[in-house]
Image (cartoon, rainbow, N blue to C red):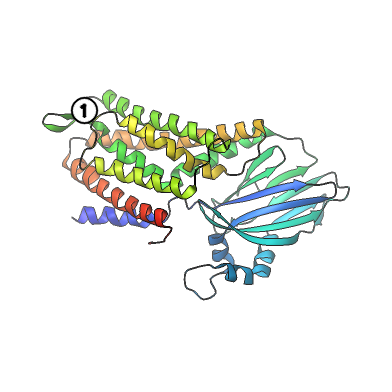
Amino acid sequence: MRTLLLLLWLFGAVAASAHQNSIAYLFLDQTNSTMKGHWEIPVRDLEVTVGLDANKDGEMTWGEIREHTAVIRDYAFKRLSLRSDSNSIPLTLTDLQVNKRPTGAMVVLFWQAPLQSRAYVTLEYNFGFDYDGGHQCILSFQNRTAVLTKDRRTFEVLGAPASLPASFPSFVRVGVLHIFEGIDHICFLLALMLPAVWRRTVRGWEAVGSFRAAFISIAKIVTAFTVAHSITLAVAALRIVVLPSAFVESVIAFSVVVAALNNLWPLWTERSWMVAFGFGLIHGFGFASALADLPAGAASLAISLAGFNLGVELGQLCMVLVFLPLAFLLRESWFYRWCAVRAGSVGIACVAAVWLVERAFQISIF
């Protein structure tokens, strides 16, 4: 019982963190004499830094955000700059709005800056790193994309040739972080992999006899999930099919519930890879939320997708490399059967059920 309570507490502690990675978006557009910017910053980041919740009720309303316009502008523009040679180019706020993304509400700053005849302009980004070392900003300008991070804070806006391959490692990093911070994706795969070191017989679940058998079972699951989400990730990024984010996130939570309950009351005993493929199609739309609004240029989009997808696969591979040896060694133990599989599945199902209610009814429980 103590083990079960501990697992429930651990899973509950991360329940609200699914898809809570701190990502900002910056879109640039150039005319002959003006650079225009569209900068989306997570509301929760601004609450941490400038304190939007004036009445301390836990909710950030449009009225509270609007009242803090000057504070937000001053704080943000001190951390975003355009420079030509050694001269700073002033940014002017033209509008402030709120936008809703799958990862949460965003404050949108619309700004512009005079270019005149400047031939060389560098953007420097310093927002968020003082309180979140993993913060990143996906930047889009013409046919180029880049991921600004603590280790890469500058972007050559004008005067530098487009370097599409240079953005590839950045998107690999985004993919790795996305799978590790996407707790719901991890829980889904974990629930499917827990019984992969067993096989169903007439006497019930029995441990597999060889590491090769366990490896093949898990390889089928991960491969099927990879193929499925890669398909729909590309489809969503190319805007061929666009599904409502609330629907996608709700189905992802539902898939985690189903996968976990199957370990307690088997709905299927074989071909878990087929389940991984079926639900993986929906998970791909969830992955696509991290690459929303990328530019339509074919080369840029291809490099962004390839890098992001590789990062997701590397993250999954790390998870398998840690899980499989431990699961195989413990597969015949009382601990694995009752604590890892049964209690772990109960914990996953409970947390995923909370996600499902939150996402389906647009409420916050944690």
Q: Position of residue 172 (x, y in %)?
A: 54, 37
Look at the image and tell me in which quarter the C terminus lies.
Answer: bottom left
Q: How many marks?
A: 1
Indicate whether 47 appears above or below 320.
below
**Image point (49%, 34%), residue name:** 232
**Image point (29%, 28%), residue name:** 271
Circle 1 packing at 10 Å, graded few (<14), some (14-19), many (20+), is some
Where residue 259 sits, quadrant-wise, is top left
Q: Does residue 78 appear anywhere in the picture?
A: no
Q: Does residue 64 appear anywhere in the picture?
A: yes
Q: Amino acid at mark 1?
A: Val
Instruction: Name the one closer to the observer, 358 or 309.
Output: 358
Instruction: Name the one closer to the observer, 277 or 84.
Output: 277
Secondary structure of the residue carrying tag 1 is: loop
Identity of the residue furthest to the left in this view: 203
Q: Position of residue 80 (x, y in %)?
A: 70, 56
Q: In the figure, is residue 265 to the left or right of 310? A: left
Q: Position of residue 37 (x, y in %)?
A: 72, 52
Q: Which residue is the site of mark 1? A: 208
Where residue 281 sits, quadrant-wise, is top left
Indicate whether 323 appears above or below 339.
above
Q: Position of residue 266 (x, y in %)?
A: 21, 38
**Image point (20%, 25%), residue name:** 209
**Image point (42%, 60%), residue name:** 363
